[in-house]
Image (spheres, rainbow, N blue to C red):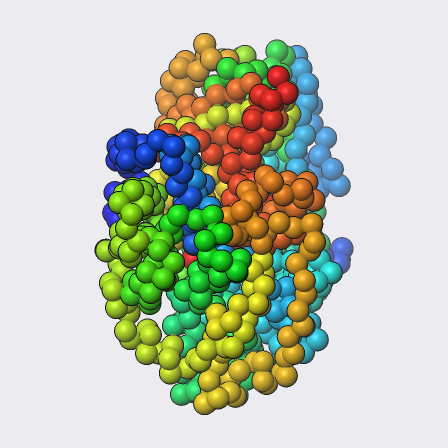
Amino acid sequence: MSYSRPLDFKNGRVDLSHGSGGRAMAQLIRELFVKHFDNDYLRAQNDGACFPLPANAGRMVMATDSHVVSPLFFPGGDIGCLSVHGTVNDVAMAGGQPLYLSAGFVLEEGFALADLQRIVISMAAAARGAGVPIVTGDTKVVEQGKGDGVFITTTGVGIVPPGIELAPQRIRPGDKLLVSGYLGDHGVAIMSLRENLSFETAIESDTAALHGLAAAMLAAVPGIRTLRDPTRGGLAAVLNEFAEAAGCGMLIHEKAIPVRGAVAAACELLGLDPLYVANEGKLVAVCPPEDAERLLAVMCAHPQGRDAAIIGEAIVDTNGFVQMETVFGGRRMVDWLSGEQLPRIC
Amino acid sequence: MKYIDEFRDGEVARSLAVQIAAEVQPGRSYRLMEFCGGHTHAISRYGLLDLLPPAVQMIHGPGCPVCVLPIGRIDSAIDLARERGVILCTYADTLRVPASGGVSLLRAKAAGADVRMVYSCDDALRIAGENPAREVVFFAIGFETTTPMTAAILKQAAALELKNFSVFCNHVLTPAAMVHIMESEGDPAHVALDGFVGPAHVSTVIGSAPYEGFAARYQKPVVISGFEPLDVMQSILMLVRQINAGRAVVENQFTRAVTREGNRKAQALVAEVFELREMFDWRGLGEVPASALQIKPAFARFDAEQRYAIAYRQVPDPKACECAAILRGHKHPRDCKVFGTACTPDHPIGACMVSSEGACAAHYTYGRFKAVSVVNEVKA
């Protein structure tokens, strides 16, 4: 191979040649993606990755997630680790053990290679931490102004062990609702950095892979009805999705919902409701009432579920309303979010 | 959270509820209007209605600045952004309000207009400084709470001699709207209201004195109330006691922030920059005399209405909408034919559905499950 100057990860920038299919693209893949994501499948440099299936695999699960977060770097994480955790969690919420990931990058011309390297290293670390290798990928470059730095789409495949059958349609009135910890951390960490909103906060994104926690929960209580990670739209969206799918209502208790003081304060300041704020390392579980305490104990014993809580139950209601008993003892609805959650002015 | 948790204590709320129930006289009804959207929001979000005896009814007033902004004014703002190519800066909840043809500032933005959400009007001034080649307009809305800040940036713009900045002023006045509610039916005796939960943040600026003439003239008690749920509960108790005693005076529950005189400095700032507008069209209420402010001639060069020769075009509220009756306490959102069907927070038709502080939006978002269960019981 002829000599080529190494990529300049200090001052270099993405240009259109990095997505053109020529030498520059091959170099970017070799010196950045293959180097950091390093595994046999990727090193083989095929267009796709062929992998064997475990014996007695049961069913397979496949999930995909596109990441367009702004800002790209935020307290507690960045778009890189987020793109790994997001898809790993989607596989895990189906009851699956994630096996492999793919990663598609859309890069904007002019994007600093130093930032791209930082993102790729963070992705590699997240994938290694989760034990789920990135085995295939794709890179495209769009002209300046046609992207927002970098967009990352990841797809994950996993296997669902026999006997595990998670679906919100299985929820019955009386079932208990659990969350794995404090809500709203990710959304508030992101908001704190948004344009014209420079308030100081020690809140960090909760971005984390949840397949370990989910596996421990399913091992202890295989009868879990369903799992879901409350990302965009927060807990409120998940509960409304559950209620609609199951054809029953949901009743949650404000007092029982774990929200950090700092998150509550930031939401107060911005006119947001923590129930609607995004999480990236939390899950919502529904289980039969007799299993709830045991499930809670298993969650609390896991590092990702230390602050788990039982927050409410499914109730009979053919309208499928989600209600909350407030700290005052009154009741109100927790409706779908209408449009984007925008701060109120007074 | 200090200064927050103290005012959200469920135990204290229940004890206030017991006191209210004990004070309520048999056979008597207490129809109380909370003027401000902030109170409407607190009542709905904390489920306060469940704690009140049936004799106490809360009527949601027109104190949501986004809701009462008339369609014609939003049309003008959209026109500025779309046709005149200005950078239009505004507060977030103005973005979604539907104007003529179903267009909103958010939709205009999606179609390429340069509309920017700001958290403070200071940001609009900063954007003007950063874009000297562009014209920047701040779309100013709000009651007396937000007016002093708009006055401050107008003075600052004058001091900086900014050439590319102006304000499209839509600031409105609370006491005038309260008077209008009492006067709009010919005889104030026809108005089905027994008392008012008075504004919180507005009163920090104007003080409690401006309501004194109102309370005396119409013989309606006014209790200035904070926005926390316990503030509202305590204010309801104070109103019930006044009504029972046949008193009609201004009382101040929100003493931690409101004085009789208000914020003199802010008032002086507003008086320096703004003057009374003869007539202003309110969505839901119609034309209300002396109920809004306009920019004084001394600051005319920063007045977007003059700079762009904006001519106000009145757009009538949709016929099917019952907002006008709801805002006066004659009807409940559930009495409106289009409520929850054609008119929802995603596709609002009337003023009360526009922002989460509007009476209909609050009922839709937080309370409609109750209306439905009533229907079910009737069917059964």
Camera-side residue of A64 and B159:
B159
User: Residue, x 38% and y 18% (percent of image)?
Assistant: A297
Camera-side residue of B30 and B66:
B30
Q: Is residue A164 above or below residue B323?
A: above
Residue A218 picture location, percent across and down = 51, 17
Q: Is residue B174 left or right of residue A165?
A: left
Residue B193 picture location, percent across and down = 43, 49
Number of marks in picture: 0
User: Residue, x 46% and y 78% (percent of image)?
Assistant: B276
Q: Is residue A13 above or below residue A235?
A: below
* Quarter of the figure with residue A193: bottom left
Camera-side residue of B240 and A116:
B240
Residue B307 picture location, percent across and down = 59, 85
Q: Is residue A329 visible?
A: yes
Residue B194 picture location, percent across and down = 39, 48
User: Residue, x 46% and y 57% (percent of image)?
Assistant: B188
Camera-side residue of B325 and B44:
B325
Q: Quadrant of the C terminus of chain A?
A: bottom left
